[in-house]
Image: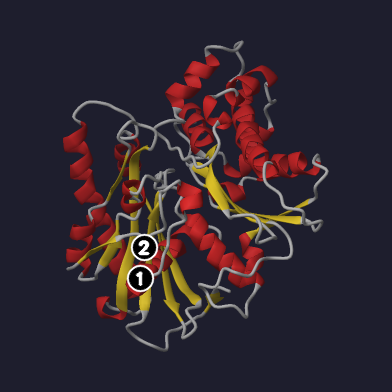
Amino acid sequence: MIKHVKGFTNKQHYYLGLMSGTSADGLDLALVSFDEHNKLVHHASYYQAYSDETTAKITSLYNPNTNEIDRAFELDIELAKLFANAIHTFLAQEQLTCNDIIAIGSHGQTVRHRPRLKHPFTLQIGCCQTLATLTNIRVIGQFRRKDMALGGQGAPLVPAFHNTIFSECLHSDKLAFDTSSKASSDVFVVNIGGIANLTFLPATNKLAVIGYDTGVGNALMDDWFQLHHPDSDSSYDKSGHWAAKGKVNAALLKQLLSDEYFDMTPPKSTGREYFHLLWLEQQLSCAEPITNQDVQATLTAFTAITIVNAIKQHKSDSSNIAKVYLCGGGAHNDTLKNIISQKLALDSKKYKLLSTSEKGIDGDQLEAIAFAWLAFCFDKNHLSSMPAVTGASKACTLGTAYIP
């Protein structure tokens, strides 16, 4: 189980996890340690919002445009400096120094993920070497690349962590890396960031853990909201209030769901370079004109239904109620959650919709915690990838070390 501890008793035993998601709204930091049984202890978290200018620089790189190399690699350094400043602030807040941190596990900022090309690649920026030098802390980063070198998609990375942590939560007497024990019921962990991903933890050892990107998460809802609320103090539809006032358009919803991505079988992963406003405009051109608010309502239903459709594809023979844990920014969208709950209720197999907070896990910090865990796995030489999830030829220890 993830423990939450206030205060620090053993110096020089902490890892920092760093995550900047595809929503490009800010940086999450998580401070963790590991006890004598390798159990993860979460001590503190920190969030640094991006300026509108920084967000614009990031999102402008999601799709091909002019002068990309200069813009991408200047931002690579700029983000590393921003990450370093946030870390210095966080450590000062927690009365720690760089000498108290074993390593930073940095995912970086994904600006392009192309797993289906003839020569697949992925690009995360926020220069790890610059970050290590500026913080004087060793950095473990570039977690996706070895998996891709082994023929995998390099994403999603968090199912291996979900498997470990949720096994711990359900079997607290087991060590962190003992994944032989299974829950008494099927467990789904759904992270709804800019892109949504699902991890299926079956109740039986006869089925393998499965994880993949279900499709768009908050990305299109956020982009559409920002496009039509340029003067709003918020960059997203808080709690889905705007969507709740609209009406789902059946024709547009059918058009969105017809995209070939949803017919693909796992392993599969995607990103903001695929699901973006241009993609949405192409779908809208095939539908009758509808109001902007109805588009938002339809996008919210689209996200919910693609998540639910993915969940319903997987189940074991367990007769127990399957548990569906939501995390990420989308877990705060009440309209989205209500649609997910309603759609799950229509299935003959029973589901219980839960928040990861009910397991003592901060859903907003789960991915940052995961990258601290991946850095720990790197140091301990533990396997941290799941070929069944990514399609790689074998499991490996993810990450590369950067020395100050």
Give the labeled residue for mark 2. Answer: 397
Q: Would you say 351 lies left or right of 294 here?
A: right
Q: Is residue 365 visible to us here?
A: no
Q: Look at the picture and state if 29 lies above or below 23.
A: below
Q: As rendered, which of 291 and 160 lies closer to the eye? A: 160
Query: What percent of the width, then of the height, locates residue 37?
Result: 49, 83
Q: Is residue 402 visible to us here?
A: yes
User: Does the residue at mark 1 contact the one at mark 2 (Cβ under 8 Å)?
Assistant: yes
Q: Would you say 79 lies left or right of 152 here?
A: left
Label 1, label 2: how far apart the Cα atoms are: 6 Å
Q: Look at the picture and state if 120 lies above or below 252.
A: below
Badge 1: residue crowd in 10 Å (few <14, some 14–19, many ≥20): few
Mark on residue 381? Answer: 1
Query: What percent of the width, then of the height, locates residue 75?
Result: 23, 44
Query: Which secondary structure, mark 2?
Result: loop
Q: Look at the picture and state if 310 lies above or below 92.
A: above
